[in-house]
Image: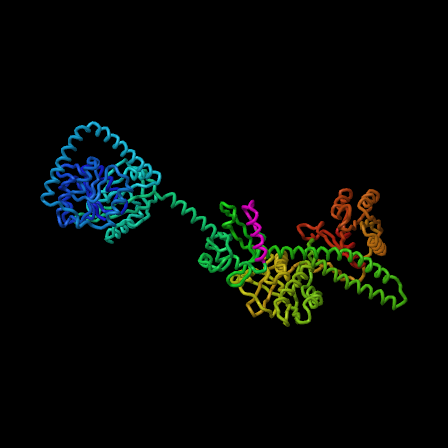
Amino acid sequence: MRILVVDDRQDSRYLLEVLFKGHGHQVLTASHGNEALEKLAGRDVELIISDILMPVMDGFQLCRQVKKDEALRHIPFIFYTATYTGPQDEALALQIGADRFLQKPCEPDILLGVVDDLVAAGSRASGTVPDPADEEELLVLYNERLVRKLEQKMVEAEREIEERKKVEVALRQSEQRLVAAQRLAAIGDFTWDVDSGQVRWSASLCELLGYDHFVNFNYRQINATVHHPDDVDRVSRWLKRCLDSGQERLTPHEYRVIRKDGATRFVRTVGTIERSSGNGPQVFATVQDITEQKQAEHRLQEAYQIINMSPAVAFLWKNAPGWPVEFVSDNVVDLFGYRVDEFLSGNVVYEAIIHEGDRARVVHEMKHVEQDRDIQECRLEPYRVVTKDGGIKWVDERSHVRRGQDGAVTHFQGIVIDITEARLIEAQLLQAQKMESIGRLAGGVAHDYNNMLSVIIGHAELALGKDIEDDSLRDDLQEILAAAGRSRDITRQLLAFARKDAIIPEVFDLNQGVATMLKVLRRLLGEDIDLVWMPGAELWPVRMDPAQLDQILANLCVNARDAIVDVGTITIETKRVTFDQAYCVDHIDFVPGDFVMLGVADDGCGMDRSTRERIFEPFFTTKETGRGTGLGLATVYGIVKQNEGFINVYSEPGEGTAFRIYLPRYRGDMAESVEVQEVQLPIGDKELILVVEDEAAIMKLTERILDSLNYRVITAQTVTAALKLMQRHGDELALLITDVVMPEMNGRDLANRLRSQCPHLTCLFMSGYTADVIAHRGVLEKDVHFIQKPFSRKDLACAVRQALAAR
């Protein structure tokens, strides 16, 4: 609405102008009646608000002129006066043709309400216009009211001065309150004359931007010094778009400004555009500092980014049937496969994605949380969820409970974390621990079994060493010895499975090592798997622990068997290979040199690239839960690297898999091999040997064998007894044979203790299980003498002779 405000006081006109513009109206102003009539000419004014007592032409006269003019009489006319305030004044005003009579000061809500009522009631086109006789009578009344008012003014002059002061004080207080309110709300305002470019800031806007009060700018100065350089073009386009639209509203816009002190602030501007014919647009707008809001939004956005990059999905569930989701972070799609909008639209409710096997438990736990009003934080037992593609994942939920004033739960807010991989690793770890326990059990059984086999083998050999005329008795002893040998092979397999002790490198032919393992592998693979052995010719020797070769073959063959459906073929081959530097340049995984290749290939399902890249990771497995620990290939990889070799894998989906292991050629003397080729047993020269063994049967057997080999023997079942014997026979003692693991002290510590008294003493360690206490970094060194139980008479004879020869 376009309103004409007529008042000789500038401050009164300004207050009414601010009030009406703030409510979306356009305002014209005039300081007396004549000026008002000029502004009414050619302008579409919809309401006139006029004071009465004014210079040149007062309000009564203005109202008479308006109501007599056929083109203007329809415009509603309100008297707003602080001078003519009596009932006779109001009667005269209404007789002249005014629509309302209001006394100053008037509450803004009342004034705005009167304006709205007049607009709703429509125009007064048929308003009363006095005839000539009435005109004279009105003139008399007008003159009387004017004379009396002048008299009153003379009488009240001094009083008015005081009242004016009070009004001015009240006005200043009101303005101060307005400025204070704007300051608290970080709001200022400005008026911009578009044609002249002049901009008038309010005191609060000056303070907001750090300038002196009532500073005057033109638009170009503001663009150059106040608007942020990076936002100038955008702000200019926004203002031009609003001005060119023909609308009367300055749409909200956010941009940056620069304070006088150089600080950058974010502001939000909204306002109105006053358009009048003959004059350029006038913009009145408010400016609000929204810097803190923007900073909070930025921090919130950073928090969202952190959440979306983390494995935790943030949720806000409503405590209603199905637990509808009212908020969820963007990364929910990575966990569940559902988009944010699918949750927020209600198409997906949280309860529906909980696995049916866990849903009742989760609902029961949440009901308990609802009933216990002391619970503010809850963490449910892990449960399963069903993803959009039908997959199953394990999640861990932690949430905060929101309660209303009555204590009832209204919402749950918290996070959901995918723990599927952690649960899998935990299951694999438990499986590995179970296998380790089985390994310990197997090792313990093998240890005790070896002790008994030592007794059986030793006594059978002693018996065969005697003159036996009965051939059938000799055959029986041979069968006993053969059966004990086969049992020894079985226990060695158990020890290879359980081994965590030192490795004992030997120099041997790889073909012989594989051949001795074939029978065990065929039993391991079953009848549906055809095991093909393709040994290479004239292999170079390798140096490694034979038990490690057994582990490599067992792990690779078991994996190959699991990759084959129904029937299939596994091929083991060996050959000599040499890689030169040129070849290795094009094959980055290869190393120059001479190698013995051990290959294990199958015609199973094969692997894709992503699987091949992870197969040597500990605990990585493609087998279903309970069928694999994920440690087999990791063990193979570790053994190959420990022996300075390397391994390559060739596989494609549906094409099978081939593992090729390259072990470095051993260039030393094959005589390092433990196996001794001599048929004749080496005999002693009455050297004195101390045997320390806590197992009485083995101690006695060892004593008998050594005695038969022309050695003098003293024995001890305990460390204490061994120390006493050392004190008596230390000078003549040539060799110490000791068990590795004993109740009072291990064999290494005993040997060190005896060597401190007898430095020339040589030691031969024996064990049915572990040699780790005498190893250095897991490998038995060359100058350490060790014999594995059960041993034959020949094994012991050779081991003793080698130890004595090393003195």
Q: Camera-side residue: 616 or 282?
A: 282
Residue furthest to the top in view is 158
From the top left corner, tell me how far across and down residue 748 is, in percent. Answer: 74, 47
From the top left corner, tell me how far across and down residue 260 is, in percent. Answer: 30, 38
In the image, taking residue 798 as reference, residue 420 lies left or right, namely left
From the top left corner, tell me how far across and down residue 579 is, in percent. Answer: 57, 63
From the top left corner, tell me how far across and down residue 530 is, in percent. Answer: 66, 71
Residue furthest to the right in view is 469
Q: Camera-side residue: 454 or 431?
A: 431
Which image quadrant is residue 92 in? top left
Residue 625 visible to an observer of this rendering: yes
The verdict on residue 163 being magenta is: no
Residue occupying the point 46% across, 55% down: 330
Residue 640 visible to an observer of this rendering: no
Q: Which residues are magenta?
A: 358-379
Residue occupying the point 54% across, 52% down: 397
Q: Main secondary structure of the magenta part?
A: helix
In the image, taking residue 343 as reference, residue 241 lies left or right, namely left
